[in-house]
Amino acid sequence: MNEQRLQTVSSFPGSGTLAAQQNRVLRNTYWLLALSMLPTVLGAWLGVATGIARAMSPGVSMIVFLAGAFGFMFAIEKTKEKSTGVYVLLGFTFFMGLMLARLLSMVLGFKNGGSLIMMAFGGTATIFFAMATMASVVKRDLSTMGKFLTVGAWILFFGFIANFFLQSSALMLTLLVLCLGVFSAFILYDVKRVIDGGETNYVSATLAIYLDVFNVFQSLLSILGIFGGERD
C-alpha cells in the first residue's frame, strides 16, 4: 500500500490525451466507489441481522479483520490490471461491511442509534465532497503530503493495536479524533493523485479512497456514539 500511494508518473503538461485519461480514471474511480457501497451496506446488514460479528470475541474479531483485510488488499493489488480486480474489490467491501456490523450493533443499542448512524453517514459524505472539491481546485503538488500521512496512518494502526490491550478510554478517543483528521486528509491526497495522474489504475484508486471513507465513517460514528449515545 505504501508503494502504491507514493508512485508517480511523468507526463507532458497540457496534453489532451493525458487529460482525457486522467478524467476517465477519476470517473471510473467514482463509479466504482459508489458501486462498492452496495456490498458494504449488504455486508453490514447481514452482519447486524445474523449477529455474526458480535458472536466473535474482540480478539478473534481483530485477527479475522486484520487477516481478511490484508489478504484482500494483497489480492486486489495482484489482480488490479484485470477485470477480476473489480470483483475482488467488491468482495473486500462486503467483508468490510461485515466487520463494521459489530460497531453498528453497538450504536443501534442506543435509543438514538439510527439517527447517530445517519449523522455519521451525512458527516462522512460532507467531508468526502469537501475534500474532493478541494482536490479539484488546489493547484500545488501534494505528493510530499503522502509520506507524512502514511507515517500517521501506521502510528494510528499500532496505537489501536496497543489500546486493544490497554483499554484506555482517553487514548481511544484521541486515536479516533486523529484517525478522523488523518483519513480526511487522505481523501484530499488520494483524489488529488488521480486528478494529477499520479494514480492511473482506477481499481487501486478506488481501494485507497474507499479505505479513507471507511475510516472516516467508522471514526465519526464511534465519536458520536461516545458523546451522543442515549441509553434507555
Image (cartoon, rainbow, N blue to C red):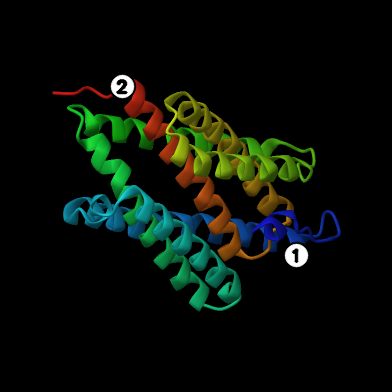
The residue under label 1 is 17
Kindly indicate the quadrant of the structure image that contains residue 64: bottom left
Mark 2: few/some/many CA within 10 Å (<14, 14-19, 20+): some
Residue 49: image location, x then y, percent: 17, 53
Number of marks: 2
Q: Residues within 10 Å of mark 1 (few under 14, many from 20)?
A: few
List x then y, in percent, for residue 40: 35, 55
Q: Is residue 182 visible?
A: yes
Q: Quadrant of residue 227?
A: top left
Q: In the image, what residue occupies the spot 52% across and 26% down?
A: 174
Select label 1 or label 2 by which is in front. 2
Q: Residue at x 47, y 63 (%)?
A: 67
142, 78: nearer the viewer? 78
Quadrant of the drawing holding the N terminus? bottom right
SS at circle 2: helix
- Mark 1 near mark 2, Cβ–Cβ under 8 Å? no
Q: Which mark is residue 224?
A: none
User: Residue shown at 76%/41% (left/top)?
Assistant: 142
Q: Name the element at disc 1.
A: helix
Residue drawn 46% across the image and 33% down it: 126
Is 201 located above or below residue 82 in the figure?
above
Disc 2: which residue: 228
Q: Is residue 96 above or below residue 154?
A: below
**Residue furthest toward the left?**
232
Kindly identify the amino acid type of the residue bearing the numbered disc 2. Gly
Give the mark, 1 or 2, whose residue is nearer the N terminus: 1
- Gap in Å between the C-alphas at discs 1 and 2? 50 Å
Q: Nearer the viewer, residue 140 or 172?
A: 172
